[in-house]
Amino acid sequence: MRFKRYAIYHLPIGDFHELGSAWLGWNNRLGTHCVPTLGQDWIVERPKKYGFHATIKAPFRIADGCSERDLIDAFDTFCQSTAPITTGACNLRRIGRFLAITPTDPLSDLNDLAARSVKYFDAFRAPLEQDDIDRRRKSRLTPDQDALMLRWGYPFIFEHFKYHLTLTGPLPAEQIYTVENSAQNVFHRFLKGAYGINTLSLMGEDIDGYFHEVQTRQLAQTA
């Protein structure tokens, strides 16, 4: 297997993705590094290896008896049966102690897409190892989140899902405002108009923990 884990992400396109990749210091489409925009690696250390993205189905180890080719074929079928989604404006938001870009208003279509993805690709997911379970439980999961993790491999799904493009790791309270202002200046032109989710990307995690684009497909279903 080429990669140790796979995931389904949405990667922004064009200048938006280029800006986000430069901000984090890793381009998950091109597989290239750069110096992060802020020049302070610790700010983006946690999200950097994933690249600029929004998680649709969280990373998973592929199940015994399944191949990458099987997963790619299923991914193609899924995208062909999935309609594009248009959000309203996005905004910069504090989620706990980290910063992310999120749609201003919740979208049931987007939540449904993520939920359908979790269920559709579950057949390709190997069971969690005990180390994974123990690590997740350090996040003080609710009983419902714990049950979701044990059943579906990830706790923040279904009613706990929040579409977001992560920009930082956890920030000290005294620095959040400064980093927030910098992010606002960098991304301001992408925080105004509607935002289209027209593609999904199958991603693979290399031995060093960096995620790479395996395949991107247009969402093809029409009304």
Image: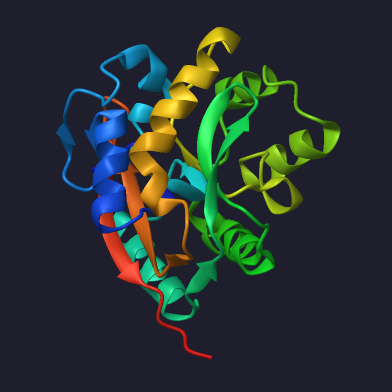
Can you give x and y, in whole percent of width and height, for residue 107 in the image? 66, 63
From the viewer's side, name the closer residue of 133 and 170: 170
Can you give x and y, in whole percent of width and height, for residue 102 in the image? 55, 47
| Quadrant that contains the N terminus | top left
Farthest bottom residue?
223
Residue in view at x 34 percent, y 36 percent: 4
Residue 78 vs residue 163: left or right? left
Which quadrant would residue 116 be assigned to in this image?
bottom right
Which quadrant would residue 69 be assigned to in this image?
bottom left
Which quadrant would residue 98 be assigned to in this image?
top right
Can you give x and y, in whole percent of width and height, for residue 192 in the image? 47, 56
Residue in view at x 42 percent, y 22 percent: 46
Farthest right residue?
143
Can you give x and y, in whole percent of width and height, for residue 204 in the image? 31, 44
From the viewer's side, name the closer residue of 42 and 185: 185
Residue 91 vs residue 61: left or right? right
Residue in view at x 54 percent, y 46 percent: 91
> In the rendered image, is residue 5 in sight?
no
Residue in view at x 17 percent, y 39 percent: 31
Location of residue 49 with respect to 54 vertically, above or below:
above
Residue 79 vs residue 106: left or right? left
> In the rendered image, is residue 188 in sight?
yes
From the viewer's side, name the closer residue of 56 and 186: 186
- How many marks are shown on the rendered structure? 0
Location of residue 218 with respect to 164 vertically, above or below:
below
Residue 3 vs residue 143: left or right? left
